[in-house]
Image: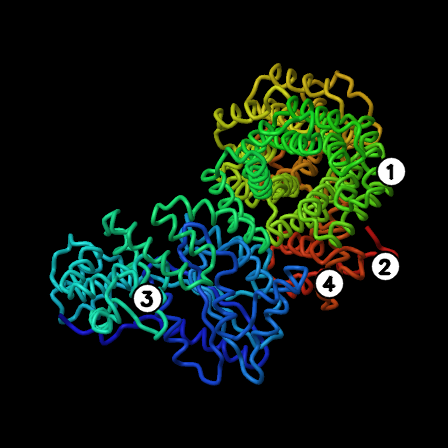
Amino acid sequence: MGTLEHPFLERDALLAQLARSARAASEGLGHLVLVTGEAGAGKTTLLRAFEAQIDHTCVLHGACEDLSIAEPLGPLYDLSRAAGIDLDALLRTERERLAVFGSFLDRLEAPGRASVLMIEDLHWADEATLDFIRFAARRLHDRRLLLVLTARDGESEGRPQIRRALGGVSPADVTRIALQPLSEAAVAQLAAGSDWPAQELYRVTGGNAFYVTELLRGGGADGLRGVQDALLERIGRLPAEAKALIEAVSVFPRRAERAWALDAAGIGDGEDAIDAAMAAELIEDTGTHLAFRHEIARQAVETALRPRRRRRLNAEVLSAMQAAGGAPIARLLHHARGAGDREPMARLAPLAGREAVAAGAHRQAAEYLSLAVELADEDATSDFAALLWDAGVACHTVARLRDALAFFERALALIDRARDTLAAGRILQRISRLHWQMGRKAVARAVGDEAIAILADSATPERAMALANRAQIAMADAETELSDDLCRQALSLARRLGEDEIVAHVLGTLCMLASGTVAELRAHAAESLAISRRGRFGFTLTRTLSNSGVIHFYFFLDYPAALDLYEQSIATSYELEVFQQTDFARAFRVHVLDRAGRWDEAVAESDALIAEQGEQSSPAIMARLTVARVAMRRGAPVDDRMLAEIVTLLGEEEDVRHVMDVACLFAELACLGLEARETAQAWIDRALTMPCPPVFREELFDWQRRIDPERPLGPLDGVHAPYLASFAGDWRVAAEEWARIGDPYREALALAEGDAEAVAQAMKILQKLNAAAALEHARATAHDRGIDVSAPPRRRAATLDNPAGLTQRQLDVLRLLNEGLSNAEIGARLFISPKTVDHHVSAILAQLEVATRGEAAARARDAGWLAQARPLATQAD
């Protein structure tokens, strides 16, 4: 067999990239580098080679472990031990978790030199660690810190974790290094002089660096033999004590404390065994720890253990850990599960759950507490009921709705409702909320009323929250008067009791009630956000941000502001790890992307929502509606199964907004000749029987006039200008309004009702949207009206005034881009957020078909458009 003289082929450019990042960090320009690749691609090898190259740098190591349930902040504890930081003391003294993260980063910086923080195997990270990474990524640019992460990039493991860790982080703050498999030429170079034919070795391994190395070490030319077989054969040739040691080390995720591994193996000081395992290039010895050279090898050995042997080794490890003391609860529980020992599992699981809650690792808390319920003594009624409550809250926080409902219902069955009314009311309120989120509206109302009734004689936070919950349901049902009355009761009681979180929750509902003035809605939302931010009330904060997005979309038709608020809600939910509202915000964001003509983005996010199979009905409906709408407009076959799923998800107790949207979908299908007009009219009639504010009906009215122009549209109070113009037959004003708002599809629909020049412009917009079916319909309708769309159109006055088709607000932004201002500076000048500016900039680049801000400004200067921007001193949205 040949020696591996070139173990690091095809990685020089990646090493150079890491080296550049390290040099920048030494100059105070910190950064985050993410190294991704499949298992065995060489991520750890790359980091070791990088570490060997850098001088005058403090290198600290941390890693995530393949525990049955991830240890909260495990990698941070690794870093803290290496840096001599008391992380537990920080957690005790700092009230806010983000303050802990900030203090931790401060302490990780080494005086006078750069620090490189390496965290490996992000695909096994807990949520609190992901939050730290997201926090750090935004704050490295002025520090002497380089954070290097590794992760597998498979969809089932690495990618979801990467999305959680880096969601909302600017691409400029992250360098991504993707390790590719070795090329066939590289494999041939490594195989030279071995018994392996190069082409066969490449075919068997696919260029995976670990597999290539292990098969070359194993010798032979049997292409059917797997890497696991080669490893086990090598181990089988070792002395018995070395084999026992390797098996013991295999049950430790990542690495084994030397003394504990030797105890588990039962081989005394084990020096000869360690030497033999190291000589076989299977184990590394750091002096305090033993570890496999690669995780694939560890897993191969562990999975090959007989079940009885695996259980015994885990039991020995657990015993050694408990005798030594100080082991993390998550690790103790992992080995207790591996040993199949219920007693320590039942004792440790609740402790691990509470520890995870304190660390903000709510996903892990839900797993631990669910396990605790499974193992608990149900005869200890009061303790078990409390445990069920804790498990229900943890599952509800991370949107595991069915599990949460089951835990709450079991807890309710254990208590005496007549004697413990507070507990009963508290549980009933949660059950009501869960039924509402799952689309069971009638049950949600009834249980919500029961919660209020059982708490009728108490002036308590439980009653205030029960009232707030029922007010929210009434708001969603468009029962404005009932919701307003319940809100006033809840708000008065919550303020009297000093319950700020409930106050913020109620204000988050009041800001959605159409009975209020615009100023009142804004004031309620602003106060709710201020209280939630001050108190770090995660669910209420994400909910009010999302509700504010709904206000800006439905009531103001302000798409950029709505997108900004939804994205804030989503980012906050990941930052605080509270996911009850996340899918709602994602689904509403998709709806606005659809309206803004960003159809590819809308469909991609909708597909993701559908694939994730979340348990909330509203996001599931909205995602499917978006996919169906875009497919219909683009001429793709309409998926009858998806339409059936939408109708099924609506259920018997329907959300008025969803029914309106479904009716609009069927009306649009009918207009495109894909559905019977009678079916569409039946859906419209069904929707119009439901109480709701006029702004929820205006889109439906617009389709109603197309389905049956003779039908009266009903009250139009509060309907927005572009709809009123369409209803009055003024297609020109309607198109101008939709262009100003930034809704290209509706702009095209309005133009398609105009003269030949307008129809030509409509067809141009529809072509850009790739809306083949809508384009053909516009062409056919124009032909029926006697308009020759084949003639070259004359340029309309509005087009001469603004050849780029930009809105006035976009022209304002473009003028400030020409001045070289940043998004934050533009936002300050225009009284809008930097995120809203970013949306305007993206729209400008797309409309002008340029790649950079500089190109956009140059084109505007050359065309003389900048003079059309308004004076900026009084501009405010």
Residue at horizontal 51 percent and vertical 40 percent from the top? 607
Q: Is residue 302 above or below residue 590?
A: below
Q: Nearer the viewer, residue 208 or 39?
A: 39
- Callout 1: few (<14), some (14-19), or many (20+) C-alpha neighbours within 10 Å? few
| Left or right: 271 as drawn, with respect to 425 | left
Say what amino acid the circle numbered 1 marks.
Thr
Disc 3 from disc 1: Cα separation: 65 Å
Residue at horizontal 65 percent and vertical 17 percent from the top? 681
Residue 291 is marked as 3
Mark 2 or mark 1, which is nearer the start of the sequence?
1
Say what amino acid the circle numbered 3 marks.
Ala
User: Where does label 1 land, which residue?
Assistant: 517
User: Where does label 4 land, which residue?
Assistant: 824
Kindly report which numbered mark, 3 or 1, lies closer to the viewer in this rendering. 3
Residue 513 location, x and y as percent? 80, 34
Q: Nearer the viewer, residue 742 or 7?
A: 7
- Callout 2: few (<14), some (14-19), or many (20+) C-alpha neighbours within 10 Å? few
Kindly report which numbered mark, 1 or 2, lies closer to the viewer in this rendering. 1
Helix or strand or loop: what does disc 4 sit on?
helix
Disc 4 from disc 3: Cα separation: 49 Å
Mark 4 or mark 2, which is nearer the start of the sequence?
4
Say what amino acid the circle numbered 2 marks.
Pro
Residue 871 is marked as 2
Helix or strand or loop: what does disc 3 sit on?
strand
Residue 701 location, x and y as percent? 73, 25
Q: Are marks 4 and 3 in contact (CB under 8 Å)?
A: no
Q: Are marks 2 and 4 in contact (CB under 8 Å)?
A: no
